[in-house]
Amino acid sequence: MLKKQIALIAVSVSVIAAYGGTLTQYVNPFTGTGAIEGGLSGNNYPGATVPFGMVQLSPDTHPAPDWFNASGYDYNDSSIYGFTHTRLSGTGACDLIDISLFPTTCDATSSSFSHDNETASPGYYRVLLDDEGVTAELTATPRTGIHRYTYPEGSEAHILLDLERSAQKGSWDRKIINSQLRVENPTTLSGYRVITGWAKLRKVYFVAEFSEPFESVELFDGGSSRGNATVANGRELRGKFAFAAPDRKVTVKVGLSGVSVDNARENLHAEAPHWDFDRYAAEADAAWDRELAGIEVTGDPEKMQTFYTALYHTMIQPNTFSDVNGEYMTPQYSVGRVPEGETQYTTFSLWDTYRAAHPLYSLIMPSRNADFVNSMLRHYDDYGYLPIWHLWGQDNYCMIGNHAIPVVVDAVMKGTPGIDAERAYEAVKGSSEQTHPNSPFEVWEKYGYMPEPLQTQSVSITLEMAFNDWCVAQLARKLGKDEDYKKFSRRAGFYANLYDPQTGFFRGKDENGNWLEPFDPLKYGANGGYPYTEGNAWQYFWYVPQDVDGFIALAGGQDAFEKKLDTFFTLTESSGEKNDNISGMIGQYAHGNEPSHHVAYLYNDVNAPEKCQKLVHRIMNELYNNSSSGYAGNDDCGEMSAWYVFSALGFYPVNPAGGEYYLGTPAFDSCTINLADGKKFTVNARRKKPDSYRVKSVRLNGKPYKSLRLSHDDIMAGGTLDFILD
């Protein structure tokens, strides 16, 4: 079935290249959209968006999406319930799903569809609604979604607009607080809704303009018709609009804003002033082609599709949140304004993306990464600490630690222009001292670890906070803050306080220093009530990226560490049920979730790079493909994709803020990173055979390179890295 699906999708991708650019032809938006045989897939969606846009316009294949169809779309479904303008890409939880439109000939609220009549490319989506005979096409600008509906000859042409449809009501206490739908004139609607859920109290404003005037209008609140009223207020608002549609086509432009209806209108008029749908789709494709051109690879076409689809998924989010006039809704629910030339962003899934996605942004788009960091600093100014999981301008506090800290530190340490280093330091230090969810710093200082009765997920939080403190220490040293450097360096070593030499694992302790019993290193935790987060003691053993040498010594030295790595990748025993996020298994290694992502590269630290290369090659080839089930786990706002992008280049940031990359094995014959200052860094792979992956030697700028780590500065200087592969 898998090979058949890959073949079908490959055909689909080739067919829809009507707008296809040089690189967008290699992107398959259906990758990661639906599991095969019960596994995880990615939780991606195939709909229309532009790089880092506010609008993600895509079909919803479930009436109320939730955990296992978090993007709103599942490739295994066979019905479409509407086309909504916002969603999340690759997450394990669902939210957004705003402003639903559905074209119909008979007032149906859903339709069956077939993948045979469904196509997608970057910035464009098309599907035939089988029950209606209506062809729906979607494209987007950063803040505007654009629909084109083609109705069957002789049929009626209706559009349903639904402000009540959302992700599952009740999940995350989700409910609509209030909404409004207003008919401004025969071709224009406007309105808003205030909804709370995973992101609390979101305000979403919109203006919709239609290419044809309404022949009739009927507004509803729940089951009650408001007749021919031109405005309705309530919590279950819907509208039914009929059109003459003499050419059988109706185009709709929907502008969004988090601030006001007037800003939504300004966004729409600034970005979508005309009615040429094909031009918008071509411009969206061109925008994607420009972004993807940051990295140019040559090699096997199927691998190129995997690579550019992964790169595409890293560029769907973070999402634009400020309007064209610079205004945005602050976490205080006031209106802020960014400096001219900057953009406020949201959707920071930081527990995931600090590991590889943000280091990738630092490398290939430092200017945009500065906007990401400055967005976080503005959040700090309003909120008192840096964001943990930033969604529609608010913090939902999901996951542990505060991993905006390494993102901010990494950007400053790499000299990213446009970031005030002192302001950044104030934010990372303040966020490391101000107690907030999952971060009771008075407990941290008192005990030198997180005691499980006082802080659940204690081992995972201890390890991750120790890394974050190391990051603060590095920035303190850079800025000459010696006392802070000493303080945070001491805290960075707290990880050792939970190492148990008897069992050889990091373990939970109570507030009296007693190990928690019983201890089973194979038992999984979820998101509370156990010392480990979304994993077990085996998977969390390896997280000391700030002090690998000290960690190896603590664990018994290089030989013992290598043997433990060997066991980790071969031990298949289990105890009880796995956490839902655990998939993509190689022994205890779980590529489907982030805590494992760096572990294969640790073989470099025990002088066994050949084992690193073998595993990285295996993961790239076995745990990624171009089908709907193309990822081994949730893509998590592009983090799973970022692992592939880096690894395919031949290196990976084991320490996300360390300024170095561990060498692996490149997937392509040639790869060029087009750096922001016009320089180029090229990676070449000279293979003995087409499937060679073992590294025989490496040369940097023509000279033998013996180190197993590559510095960020070496890349940014431009040049050539040659791998000789046996």
Image: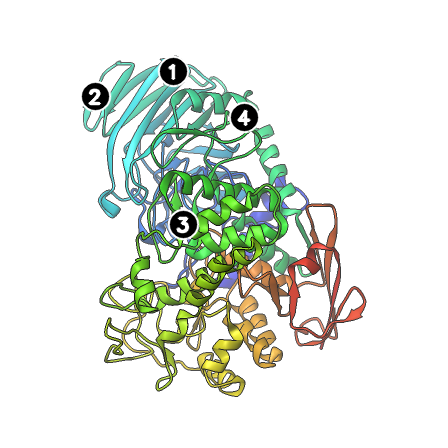
The answer to whether the residues at label 3 and label 1 have Cβ atoms under 8 Å apart is no
| Badge 3 amino acid | Gly
The answer to whether the residues at label 4 and label 1 have Cβ atoms under 8 Å apart is no
Question: Which label is found at residue 271?
Answer: 4
Q: Which residue is mark 2?
A: 225
| Badge 4 amino acid | Glu
Q: Earlier in the sequence, mark 4 or mark 1?
A: 1
| Badge 2 amino acid | Ser
Question: Which label is found at residue 430?
Answer: 3
Position of 127 compared to 601: left or right? left
Q: Earlier in the sequence, mark 4 or mark 2?
A: 2
Question: Which label is found at residue 214?
Answer: 1
Crowd tier of the residue under label 2, counting other residues whose Cα lies within 10 Å: few below 14, some 14–19, many 20 or above: some
Which image quadrant: the C terminus? bottom right
Question: Which label is found at residue 5?
Answer: none
Q: Earlier in the sequence, mark 4 or mark 3?
A: 4
Please tell me whether residue 216 is drawn above or below residue 474 in the rendered image: above
Crowd tier of the residue under label 3, counting other residues whose Cα lies within 10 Å: few below 14, some 14–19, many 20 or above: some
Please tell me whether residue 440 is drawn above or below residue 164 in the rendered image: below
Q: How is the image coloured?
A: rainbow
